[in-house]
Image (spheres, helix red, strand yellow):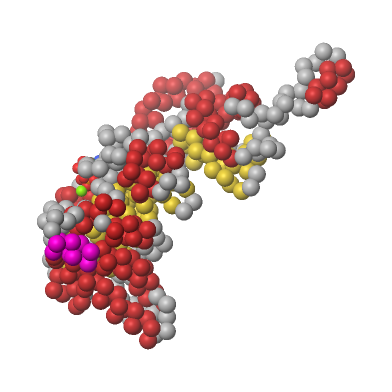
Amino acid sequence: MVAAALGVGLLVAGPTLRRRHPVAWWLCVGFPAAAWRVACTWRPLMAACGLAQSRKAALTVVSGLVGNGAPPPQPRVPGRWRMHPTSGGFWFLVRLLPGQVPEDFVKAAPAMAHDWEMHAVRVTTWRPGVVRIAATFADPLHQPRAPRQRGAGRLLQVAVGVLESGAPWVIDLREVPHWLIVGATRSGKSTLVNALVAGLAPQRVALVGIDCKGGMELALYTRRLSALATDRAQAVRLLGALVELTQDRMTICRKARVRNIWSLAEQECPVPVVVIVDELAELFLIANRTEKDESQAAATALVRLAQLGAALGVFLVVAGQRVGSDLGPGVTALRSQLGGRICHRVADSGTAEMALGDLNPDALHAAQSIAPGAPGTAVLASADGWECARSHLVTETDAEAVAAEFAHLAPSLPELADHAP
Ligand SMILES: Nc1ncnc2c1ncn2[C@@H]1O[C@H](COP(=O)(O)OP(=O)(O)O)[C@@H](O)[C@H]1O
Ligand SMILES: [Mg+2]
């Protein structure tokens, strides 16, 4: 009776529960059903994907002789560990059979997703001989929820969106100091920068803007910025001042016999500086001789900042539509210094390749299949793979409000005094 009542109750309330409380719905209804589906389909699925191995022929013959007509032994399938539910799906570990490699399972992932009626299945190597299969029941990137609370958080760490696994997408400048953000017009570059600035604004961090589109994008944060350049000449002077600032910090570190500013005593530790460049091409495209000199000076200064900056508390976030070598020789050198890569929807495969590298064709394919209807979706490349993610929608109004709220936290750096916005 109780079971029947529960069943009927869930049938009636299921759709509402799913809409209002997707996580509760998943844990109570979705996950048990998915676990049942996985258990039932595992053996036929492995066989259909060519991941089962037939027993030795001799064994089959022997069993046929002694088994008195019993069916021959089933083929061996890879062993599966217990399923673990997560807030947006489940995962489990699988031991490979002899001769199998993780790539065999990667190829089978779409079939698994269809069989189990899940949104997506990702296969990763857990340890040699074991793969981790993780499935998500809905697309977390469809309508990413904004973080519940906004606080200062850990220094130089900002949750800017959600990953396709449902986990927060965190940009940590202490871990990866310099970032390259590419994407076509209206693919979500500036929105991501907004999310980053909104997260950094409450922290003890100096923000510096370089926006050669006349300051159209970064002028929103004027009140929280410690310096702003809105054309190329200003940008070159500002970058020069930043290089000098790093050199001063280098002297301080050398005198204190430490290798980076984080090892200095707390009262001596200079404030970290995050330099945001929106639309890189505006800095590099040249029409005449003077512009060529300026653009080269800007490129050299940016490369030097990238090389020296991380240890001295200067971080670069560079956004652009393209980062091709047609923008000049400096761009290639700069690109190789920017370790963090974020690729939004792109217009051509060349740009995706420049951002993500050509090591991982899957990542390039994923970047090129981002739909125009999902701005803010991006592919993130890291040393050990790639992931899809979507930024939180932080509108211009939100960004402006945050900048005004934390305007009093904008540190004034004497080295950049001439460039105050
Ligand atoms: N994460 C997101 N979620 C929802 N909408 C977004 C997101 N990112 C961008 N958008 C929408 O796309 C529009 C263009 O984004 P924007 O950041 O200005 O692109 P870009 O700087 O690449 O030209 C924004 O006005 C916004 O409406
Ligand atoms: Mg923009």
Task: Tell whether position 291 is magenta.
Answer: yes
Image spot of residue 251 (x, y percent)? 33, 83
Q: Name the main secondary structure of what is drawn in magenta.
A: helix
Q: Is residue 248 above or below residue 97?
A: below
Residue found at the very far right of the displayed protein? 66
The quadrant where residue 93 appears: top right
Image spot of residue 269 (x, y percent)? 34, 77
Q: Nearer the viewer, residue 301 or 42?
A: 301
Can residue 365 be spotted in the picture? yes
Quick check: which quadrant has ligand 1? Answer: top left
Q: Is residue 60 above or below residue 347?
A: above
Q: Nearer the viewer, residue 139 or 388?
A: 388
Task: Tell whether position 90 is magenta.
Answer: no
Q: Is residue 125 above or below residue 77?
A: below
Q: Who's the residue at 42% across and 37% down the image? A: 23
Q: Who's the residue at 39% across and 30% down the image? A: 18
Question: Which residues are drawn in magenta?
Answer: 289-298
Image spot of residue 246 (x, y percent)? 30, 75
Name the image quarter holding the C terminus. bottom left
Residue found at the very far top of the displayed protein? 69
Q: Who's the residue at 57% across and 29% down the image? A: 38
Q: Is residue 284 above or below residue 76?
A: below
Q: Nearer the viewer, residue 292 or 77?
A: 292
Left or right of residue 274, residue 169 in this image: right
Image spot of residue 64 (x, y percent)? 83, 17
